[in-house]
Image (cartoon, coloured by chain):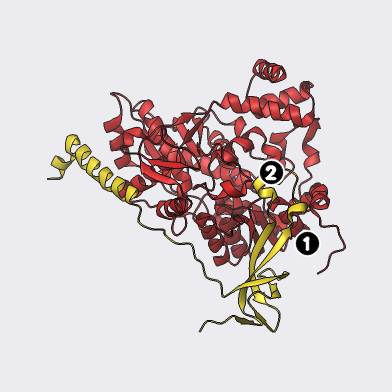
Amino acid sequence: MTSMRDDSYDAVMARRNEIMKKAVGIDYEKFTIDGIAFDYEKMMREVGYSIDEVREIQAETCVGNTPLVELKNINRLIKKLAAKGKGARVFLKDEAANPSGSFKDRRAAVSVYRAKKMGYKGVIAATSGNYGAAVASQAAKRGLKCIIVQECYDSHWRGQPEILEKGRACEAYGAEVVQLTVGPELFYYTLLLLEQTGYFNASLYSPYAIAGIETLGYEIAHQMIELTGRYPDAVIVTHAGGGLITGTARGLKKAGGTETKIIGASVDLRGLHMASDEAFNKKYFTTGHTGFGIPFAVFPDRSDVPKNAARPLRYMDRYVLVTQGEVFYVTEMLAQLEGLQRGPAGNTSLTAAIALALEMDEDQTIVVNETEYTGAGKLPSAQLTFAKQMGMVVKRGDPIKEDIPGKVIAIPQHPSQIGVIEFPVSDMKKSYLKELIKRENKDKFNDNEMEFLQEDLNAAKEEIEKWILEVRRE
Amino acid sequence: MSTNLAKKGDWVQVQLNILSPQERSKYLPEDTKKVPLQMRVKGFLVDEIASLGATVRVKTTTDRIISGILIDINPKYTHNFGEPVPELINAGVELRKLMEEVDGCDGLEGDAK
């Protein structure tokens, strides 16, 4: 098919709003209030589905209702390491039990259901993560065509093993996998595909996708009440694009768990540029790291939809970083002590959970809200072999003091070395404002905008004014 | 029998340039700016016969027709489980030993007897 359209980078990017509107079927302008302010809850209400509707949709394709288990052996180890009276109990939501092996099935289930209902012939998702396999699996079940666009090679055609595995999984479900070299123009090519095929944009960040995750928080609340008689004290969420934290927190709150602390955890890969060809294969975690976690929190609308339904700063009470070496160690621990061989992503929050359990009281509980499938490309052995080939130093040592992203991976010598690096949520809120001021080229906001900012940052007006003042001084 | 020739209908992989360095986004780090944005995709060969390195057309599983350089015929997955990593093997052994100590002081071992 030849196109008379101008398909250059600038021309396609200029058509982005028009292309996206057709491809998601949502008129986002309807939710604009005034300037930067938009009605997030109205968007979630009108476009998303209720928990009960989502549960029904997900049940049709075998998604959700995954087991929640107490990690009894790891908890005995925590008790041994903890000071007297400390050592919270850690529970794990085994999301690997979903059809394609991760919580992403929850997101994909609602998106693909919606695409089918609206009469689209196929779905497209731009993702190098488990979401690709989830969309491909759901599309297979509902008889839709599927294209997954991945960033998976550097300019020397060295593929990131985990992303190659995710591509294989997509192909197993009959999807076409478009494999790209490094660069944010993945979004450009995705727009081009949406325009050429007329398929649905199964964005990770639509209200459908986020509504799909709410059942995860909802199930955690109910399962914890059944197991322990009360809501968990904390839920730890591996944080990347912000959808998992947003959906989980919303679901928990809908189930009455309003006091539960929502803690985000990411692998520390600070200093490695996300769009750098050279840095691409110096990362041994492909998601759940700071390269996504920080930028998506401070500017959610950088995503592939005009208004991102994943807005992590509304829900995140605390943000902690862990190192690659710690997560590999904890992945080994989960296999050896609990008999659960699971993939990398959920183990980021499990690592943080072990560290935080030591500071929490022994009668408190922590839930790690996901696991994912593992295997070729995803295993610590696959990633560490690749790391060594790329010249990384892999050693036993203090995982926080000796860790250098892009240079040194230090695997703990003892579980007592597992710790976290605090990243104040208030720093991200201030960065959000700083970027907003730069983007909008203004630092005065009207009442509607101010009200929106209070919601979007989950902060008081006085705090926001103080941060704006600080940004202005800088 | 391996061959460098693909026939119509064979499952193959092609490679193509999407954006040359000049056509790329302006907002890129220096290293990425220097190289083109490239793509690989698999599909069924549309042409009658072609050898590796030739420019061919393929039909993907979503029926898109794409032109590119033929780089592989019946492409296999090459990612794997990696090599044994001594640092992790040792960590596993240590953790199991540590658990034996934990069980020892819990008295769980005693309970089991």
Identify the secondary structure beneath mark 1.
helix
Q: Residues within 10 Å of mark 2 (few under 14, many from 20)?
A: some
Image spot of residue A332 (x, y percent): 35, 48
The answer to whether residue A121 is left or right of residue A364 is: right
- Mark 1 = which residue? A196
User: Chain letter for red?
Assistant: A
At label 2, the amino acid type is Ser
Q: Residue at the location (56% across, 27% down)?
A: A425
Of callouts 2 and 1, the N-terminal one: 1
Front-most of B81 and B2?
Answer: B2
In the visual, does A264 lie left or right of A70? right
Whether residue B83 is situated above or below residue A264 in the rendered picture: below
**Where's residue A432, x and y in %?**
67, 29
Q: How far apart are marks 2 and 1 (CA)?
A: 21 Å
Give me the chain letter of mark 1.
A
Q: Chain B is drawn in which colour?
A: yellow
Residue B37 found in image quarter:
bottom right
User: Front-most of B70 and A466?
Assistant: B70
Name the foreground residue: B63 vs B8: B8
Q: Both on one chain, marks 2 and 1?
A: yes
- Point out which mark residue A303 bears: 2
Q: Nearer the viewer, residue A27 or A13?
A: A13
Q: In this view, does A251 lie to the left or right of A145?
A: left
Disc 1 marks which amino acid? Answer: Gln
